[in-house]
């Protein structure tokens, strides 16, 4: 857990004991909240730490309300004209907005820099506006993340337009896809074991199987493979790679299907090993695509490693300072 000042902790406890609705200066937004262009709005804010809040967003793009966790730097203040750079951390499938906080020391990492860190809900939405057999409509996860969340954080928590993004698994795919589909949105983007070739041989079948297991209509997300190939292409990081020119790009994955440091003992048919090997093949293809396009990148295709947090934590810990430097965050 991130370190907190004794004075800030005592002040927070005192406020709770008194039943106060206001929060200490410098730790949370003062209502009323400003809405996003779509009408999305923050309908609740819950302080979970001196510099940490969960916000509930009523989203027209999703047709429901979901939560997002926001980590604010120590020098953050409400009611100021100052702005702070921001990093978005996207979670993987079958998880939620608390994933990074539960599985990593992201709070401690964030506490060392004067940047805002935002962990949005993504459910199992595949980081895309669903195709819905060509009819479109909700859920629109890409719109939620790239428009609604961004605007709400900038308008209510003083985030600047200088942004970075990191994601694990599906969140890594989402980070790269968003950066490529919205050139200039992020200064730096990092994928940890993300699928970076959506249409790789066998990958559409694997994706649809996963979504079926998750209780979703697998054809509604991107469409029917081959039949709706044009829509798959529009969401495929490999096809979109040209849009990353000018963005600092990092990606990593295992490639061998063998356990890595810190991984549990598992048989060769373990889904975490087989899955990571398949993901690794898409990362290799993505690397080769960037080479052909002449787009700079940094890659860590580390060989042995399962599709799980031990490897992602090692990589994220190592690249965090570089992500912060890319958005001009000052170490404090």
Image (tube, rainbow, N blue to C red):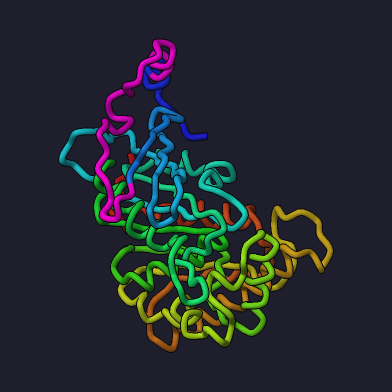
Q: Whole-percent x and y of residue 262? A: 70, 53
Q: Whole-percent x and y of residue 85? A: 29, 50
Q: Can residue 41 be spotted in the picture?
A: yes
Q: Can residue 255 be spotted in the picture?
A: no
Residue situated furthest front in the rendering: 135
Q: Quadrant of the C terminus?
A: top left
Q: Residue at x 68, y 63 (%)?
A: 305
- Number of disc labels: 0
Q: Main secondary structure of the magenta part?
A: loop
Position of 88 relative to 76 (above/below)? below
Position of 258 relative to 332 (above/below)? below
Quarter of the image for residue 182 reads bottom left
Q: Whole-percent x and y of residue 212? A: 68, 65
Q: Is residue 206 left or right of residue 135?
A: right
Position of 173 relative to 29 (above/below)? below
Judge whether residue 132 is colored magenta.
Answer: no
Read off the magenta span.
12-40
Q: Is residue 307 left or right of residue 296?
A: right
Nearest the eye: 201 or 21: 21
Residue situated furthest right in the rendering: 267
Nearest the eye: 276 or 300: 276
Residue situated furthest top in the rendering: 18
Judge whether residue 30 is colored magenta.
Answer: yes
Q: Residue at x 31, y 64 (%)?
A: 185
Q: Residue at x 29, y 51 (%)?
A: 39
Q: Whole-percent x and y of residue 28? A: 32, 32
Position of 63 relative to 257 (above/below)? above
């Amino acid at each position: 857990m991130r370190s907190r000042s004794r004075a800030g902790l005592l002040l927070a406890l005192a406020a709770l004991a008194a039943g106060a609705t206001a929060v200490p200066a410098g730790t949370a937004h003062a209502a009323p909240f400003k809405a996003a262009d779509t009408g999305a709005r923050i309908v609740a804010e819950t302080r979970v730490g001196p510099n940490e809040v969960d916000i509930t967003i009523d989203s027209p793009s999703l047709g429901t309300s979901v939560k997002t966790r926001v980590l604010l730097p120590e020098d953050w203040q409400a009611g100021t004209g100052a702005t702070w750079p921001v990093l978005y951390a996207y979670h993987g499938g079958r998880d939620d907005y608390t994933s990074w906080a539960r599985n990593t020391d992201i709070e401690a990492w964030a506490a060392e820099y004067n940047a805002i860190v935002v962990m949005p809900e993504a459910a199992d939405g595949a980081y895309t506006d669903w195709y819905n057999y060509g009819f479109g409509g909700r859920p629109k996860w890409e719109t939620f993340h790239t428009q609604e969340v961004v605007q709400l954080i900038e308008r209510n928590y003083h985030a600047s337009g200088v942004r970075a993004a990191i994601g694990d698994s599906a969140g890594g795919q989402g980070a790269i896809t968003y950066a490529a589909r919205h050139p200039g949105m992020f200064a730096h983007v990092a994928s940890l074991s993300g699928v970076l070739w959506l249409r790789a041989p066998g990958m559409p079948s694997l994706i649809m199987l996963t979504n079926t297991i998750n209780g979703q209509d697998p054809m509604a997300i991107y469409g029917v493979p081959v039949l709706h190939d044009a829509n798959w292409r529009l969401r495929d990081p490999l096809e979109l790679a040209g849009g990353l020119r000018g963005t600092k790009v990092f990606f990593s994955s295992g490639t061998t299907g063998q356990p890595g440091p810190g991984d549990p003992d598992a048989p060769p048919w373990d889904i975490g090993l087989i899955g990571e090997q398949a993901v690794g093949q898409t990362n290799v293809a993505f690397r080769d695509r960037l080479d052909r396009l002449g787009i700079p990148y940094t890659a860590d295709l580390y060989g042995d490693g399962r599709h799980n947090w031990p490897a992602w934590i090692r990589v994220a810990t190592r690249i965090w300072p570089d992500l912060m430097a890319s958005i001009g965050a000052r170490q404090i």
